[in-house]
Image: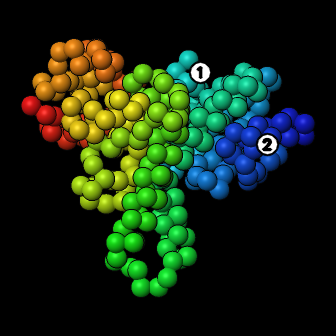
Amino acid sequence: MNPLQRTLIEKTGNDNGFEHVVASDVNGVTLASARHSNRAVVGLDSATYHVRFQAASPSLLPELLRSFAATVVEAGAFLIATEADLAALLRRAASLSRALPSQAANDYQHAVAAELAELPAGIVGTEVERMVRQRVGQNKFRDAMLDYWGGACAVTGVTIPDVLRASHAKPWAECATDAERLDVFNGFLLSANLDALFDRFLISFDEEGVLVIAPALAGKNLKLLGISPGMKLRWVNALHRPYLATHRARLQA
């Protein structure tokens, strides 16, 4: 790998969520970020990039394999043919790294601490603190959902940010820990109409992500709401399923 090739890899990392260069030599470039704890090691053999991820989150590689199912993976390395494909892989890896447990929870803790430090002393345990934690947490959860689902509704693929909502499967107030509240698998990015129904337990999803409709929601209202049997989540991770089971148990009769 020559200096120009290393520089191109470093720039591609900087532009796509891996802005720090940890190491750079003839064997490859190790990229990192201040926004997440995962690293990418990029090498170049002839005209093929070899990309390995040093992942703090065990969910990163399975999710990347879902997004890049057609990409050849050999000995743990993604084999990438073009700079554009390298950028796409790093960009998706960075988005997932910011969203997957426990990065979102870590970001939440830091953000809450910073906001509380700006407030007067003596608010610990007060309603003010509770509201700060909830507001920051919901914003971080939404950011994580946008990253995880690629900015598109988990069912319809709608990509208009103003109509997308981060929907909890297990409600915020009922979660036992901040990690559970901020768990990207405890919910879905849904368009506003689906979010309203999901939030009120009028729709849910089965183990395979197929839409489940409450008996209370029937007739012409389904069509008017843009709901049709057979709709389904674009994908389901095994870590979604326990939360979905809890949600389905509360489906309205």
Q: Is residue 111 above or below residue 88?
A: below
For disc 2, the marked residue is 10
Measured from the top left, where is residue 24 in percent x and y? 80, 47
Report the coloring of the rendering.
rainbow
Measured from the top left, where is residue 144 in percent x and y? 48, 45
Q: Secondary structure at mark 1?
A: loop
Q: Secondary structure at mark 2?
A: helix
Which one is nearer the viewer's eye here, 199 or 84?
Answer: 199
Which one is nearer the viewer's eye here, 240 or 169?
Answer: 169
Quarter holding the C terminus? top left
Q: Quadrant of residue 59?
A: top left
Measured from the top left, where is residue 62 in percent x and y? 46, 33
- The type of residue carrying mark 2 is Glu
Which one is nearer the viewer's eye here, 238 or 216?
Answer: 216
The residue lying at 41 percent from left, 41 percent from top is 166
| 207 horizontally vs 83: left or right | left
Q: Quadrant of residue 198?
A: top left
Q: Is residue 247 above or below residue 213?
A: below
Q: Is residue 17 visible?
A: yes
Q: Is residue 66 above or below residue 241?
A: above
For disc 1, the marked residue is 71
Quarter holding the N terminus? top right
CA separation in Å, label 2 and label 1: 22 Å
Count residues near mark 2 (Cα–Cα under 10 Å), then give few for <14, some for 14-19, many for 20+: many
Q: Residue furthest left?
A: 253
Q: Earlier in the sequence, mark 2 or mark 1?
A: 2
Measured from the top left, where is residue 11 in percent x and y? 80, 40
| 157 horizontally vs 246: left or right | right
- The type of residue carrying mark 1 is Thr
The residue lying at 31 percent from left, 60 percent from top is 177
| 201 horizontally vs 181: left or right | left
The residue lying at 16 percent from left, 34 percent from top is 251
